[in-house]
Image (cartoon, grey):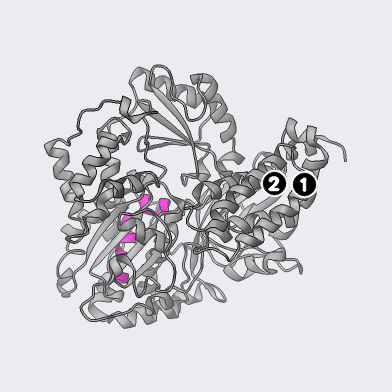
Amino acid sequence: MARKILLEHIDVPGIETYDVYRKHGGYQSVEKALKTMTPDQIVEEVKASGLRGRGGAGFPTGMKWSFIAKPDGVPRHLLCNADESEPGTFKDRYLMEKIPHLLIEGMIVSSFALGANLSYIYIRGEYHWILDILEKAIAEANNKGWLGKNIQGSGYDLELRVALGAGAYICGEETALIESLEGKRGNPRMKPPFPAVKGLWGHPTVVNNVESLAAVVPIINMGAEEYAKVGVGRSTGTKLISACGNIKNPGVYEIELGLPVEEFLYSDEWCGGIANGKKLKACVPGGSSVPILPAHLLCKTATGEPRLMSYESLAEGGFESGSMLGSGGFIIFDEDQCIVRNTWNFARFYAHESCGQCSPCREGTGWMQRVLNRLELGQGNMRDIDLLAEINKKIEGNTICPLGDAAAWPVAAAIRHFREEFEWHVTNPEDAQKGNYGLLKASMVY
Amino acid sequence: MSTELIHTEKPSFSKEKMAEVQEIIKHFPEGRQKSAILRILHMAEAEFGGWLSPETMDYVAEILSIEPIEVYEVASFYSMYNLEPVGKHVFEVCRTGPCMLVGSDQIIEHIEQTLDIKVGETTKDGMFTLQAVECLGACGYGPMLQCGKKYHEHLTKESVDQLIADFRSGKLPNKEDK
């Protein structure tokens, strides 16, 4: 299933430069779109392709585009969300670093489809060096007439710019991103109005992930029908998966959706199995916000079906026994790892990244972090485990943006699947203080 | 740290830098110059001692024709900006889950011992500041740290020692890493 659609030419030397990129079929989708298609036809094509948002939510991209308001005389904008900050996720970085023109090409076609004449790539501040790569590529595209006024004689104008963040996970939420791009604190906005109606500077705006926009290129080139043949069911096309944690071959892989999880994890073509001859303990398959899966629920679902790398299959069983494809941040834990410690670590992340706007999230994430910390240090009690579940319920669904849910889900899932381990920290406080649950358990006779 | 005690010259971009700043402001439509604030704050921080003093923030407000409070509220929201003085080289070590799984705790501990500082502190000679930060998007290449623009990945205790030695001897940072 090693089918590369996005990264077909990723290993070609010099593919980051315009000349090499163009020689390998670069900017053909712009030619096709601008010369032979209307904006509405492109939207329909992307709808028909079944492409779903690659940033984590999985919302159909074409449908999102069709919501954009078109009031007379009001500019529209396309924003590329390159704020990649979900722990476990480093795929957009790879794409932008290695093949920046692919994103630019996708943005030209997508901006044309939306009727946007001024579009931005919002990139996280830590990726400062990628900003340099992107601006160099944009300058090349400008020089060759793929950006600017009257692109390739089509009459269509597009100005594309890169804007820099400054270290705030929350700016990956689309309305926080818009606030940030307006030069403000990244506090998510109340919806409605949705960005498609009132976004950047009050103008109709669409925000899409890097990979989603890049995927528009093969969709236009191949045609929606061909693209939709790749993948499985409603999970069409390919997905970039960033695999990390305790595996032999960490890295970014393009997979055809529908690849069995077992094959992805153990085949040498992909992750290569667990590092150092250890056993698999758990996996967070779609970035830190999605529920953790214990080893026995990763490669097979609760009903014994083989689990696939797809939106549907990873979610099979709901939150009881399933998880989510999310951003494609695939994090593997070996037998030596402590789930309580990791849950605390992620809780600390969300407490740090909460924007502070909604009380349930601002107070709740900090509270969960403190409770988890005392459990991890062997200073908690049994009541704390239920307390976490209670705090969880009070955050989930009670905040303006999904950061609250993202903070709550991993904790709930960890307790659901590894309750024993939490209880061990309470009943064995001395051992919990001495060291890591995984390591201690591995060396203990039970 | 009381800011009154720190006397700083009124910051001023060089003619060349100011041209760059004006260029960035032009990335946004007229009247939307405030949108350039994040990038200009990054530039100001790099130019004026690695941190944003009240004087620097006021200067940025002046450039963007906005109120100083609009700069303060942005500068205090985003974790990349230093609101207090830092060492010449700032080591930002990722401490989040995926890096922790491959040993970031041990790397942080090793740097603390080697430099004889705790997370959040600066060495007495002002050379290094150690910060523990949240996910930098290098999860497959951890443990890692960022210094300036540059990511240093696949860290081991030995490579960290080498890194510190290279900074001490002036071999690092390279021009483009700043």
Place of residue B134 in the rendered image (x, y in percent of width and height, measured from the top left): 50, 43
**Disc 2 + disc 1, Cβ < 8 Å:** yes
Place of residue A375 in the rendered image (x, y in percent of width and height, measured from the top left): 72, 42
Q: Kindly report the distance in space between the C-alpha atoms of the residues bearing marks 2 and 1.
A: 7 Å
Secondary structure of the residue carrying numbered label 2: helix
Which of A256/A164 is in front? A164
Tag count in the figure? 2
Place of residue A16 in the rendered image (x, y in percent of width and height, measured from the top left): 31, 51
Q: Please rate how many residues cluster around mark 1, counting C-alpha atoms within 10 Å: few if below 14, some from 14 to 19, many from 20.
A: some
Q: Quadrant of residue A321?
A: bottom right
**Chain under callout 2:** A
Type of the residue with mark 1 = Glu
**Chain under callout 1:** A
Residue A102 among those drawn in magenta: yes
Q: Quadrant of residue A405?
A: bottom right
Which residue is label 2 attached to? A339
The magenta region covers: A92-111
Mark number, residue B95? none
Residue A423 visible from this viewpoint = yes
Type of the residue with mark 2 = Ile
Which residue is label 1 attached to? A421
Q: Quadrant of residue A45?
A: bottom left
For the N terminus of chain A, the image quarter is bottom right
